[in-house]
C-alpha cells in the first residue's frame, strides 16, 4: 500500500472550541469548515475534526456501533525538529486549553512530550537525531 496522503479524523464534542484550540492556540493552518468538517492541512497529513453526531455517521458505514467515541482512542505522533520547538508546542497546547500530563523528557533514545486536546485526543511529539537532521535540511 502506498497512500497518497494520510487523513486522521477525530470526533469532537464542540467544533468551535476545537477550532480555537488547533487554529488559534496551536497555530495550525486551516482553510476552514468544509461540509461540517474542520480541515487542517499539514505536511503529509490532513486532520479532520468532526462533531460527534457526524462522526457516528462515518463510523457506522464501517459497522461500528453508535455511541460516544472513546477519548484518546488514537495517538497522533509527530516528528519535531528540536527540543525547543517541542517544548514550545507543549506550552501552546496548555495555554490553549489542552493538557500536558507531564514535562517532556528523554524516553527510549528520543526527547518526547505529550499533550491532549480539549476532547482528550493524545498527541505524541518526538525529537531524535533523525528528526533534527531532517529539520536542518
Image (cartoon, rainbow, N blue to C red):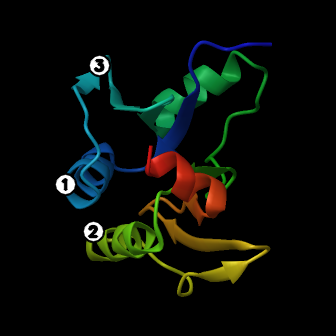
The answer to whether mark 1 and mark 2 are in CB contact below 8 A is yes
Residue drawn at x 61%, y 74% is 111
Q: Is residue 63 left or right of residue 118?
A: right
Q: Is residue 125 left or right of residue 74?
A: left
- Sequence-wise, the earlier of marks 3 and 2 is 3
The image quadrant that residue 40 belongs to is: top left
The answer for how far apart the CA atoms under marks 3 and 2 are is 23 Å
Residue 66 screen position, x and y as percent = 68, 34
User: Which residue is more in the foreground, 97 or 63?
Assistant: 97
User: Which residue is more in the foreground, 102 or 62?
Assistant: 102
Residue 60 screen position, x and y as percent = 68, 22
The image quadrant that residue 5 belongs to is: top right
**Residue 79 visible in the snapshot:** no
For label 3, the SS is strand
For label 3, the residue is 34
Residue drawn at x 35%, y 76% is 94
Q: Quadrant of the C terminus?
A: top left
Position of residue 61 relative to residue 39, above or below, is above
Position of residue 56 relative to residue 126, above or below, is above
For label 2, the residue is 96
User: Is label 3 or label 1 in front?
Assistant: 1
For label 2, the SS is loop
For label 1, the residue is 24
Residue drawn at x 35%, y 29% is 39
Residue 6 screen position, x and y as percent = 58, 25
For label 1, the SS is helix
User: Is label 3 or label 2 in front?
Assistant: 2
User: Which residue is more in the foreground, 134 or 102?
Assistant: 134
**Residue 76 visible in the snapshot:** yes
Amino acid at each position: 500500500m502506498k497512500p497518497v496522503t494520510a487523513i486522521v479524523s477525530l470526533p469532537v464534542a464542540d467544533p468551535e472550541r476545537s477550532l480555537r484550540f488547533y487554529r488559534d492556540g496551536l497555530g495550525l493552518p486551516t482553510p476552514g469548515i468544509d461540509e461540517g468538517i474542520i480541515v487542517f492541512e499539514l505536511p503529509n497529513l490532513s486532520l479532520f475534526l468532526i462533531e460527534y453526531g457526524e462522526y457516528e455517521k462515518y463510523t457506522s458505514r464501517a459497522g461500528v456501533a453508535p455511541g460516544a467515541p472513546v477519548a484518546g482512542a488514537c495517538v497522533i505522533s509527530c516528528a519535531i525538529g528540536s527540543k525547543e520547538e517541542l517544548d514550545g508546542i507543549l506550552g501552546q497546547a496548555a495555554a490553549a486549553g489542552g493538557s500536558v500530563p507531564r514535562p517532556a523528557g528523554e524516553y527510549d533514545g528520543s526527547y518526547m512530550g505529550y499533550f491532549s486536546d480539549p476532547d482528550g485526543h493524545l498527541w505524541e511529539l518526538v525529537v531524535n537525531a533523525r528528526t533534527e537532521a531532517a529539520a536542518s535540511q
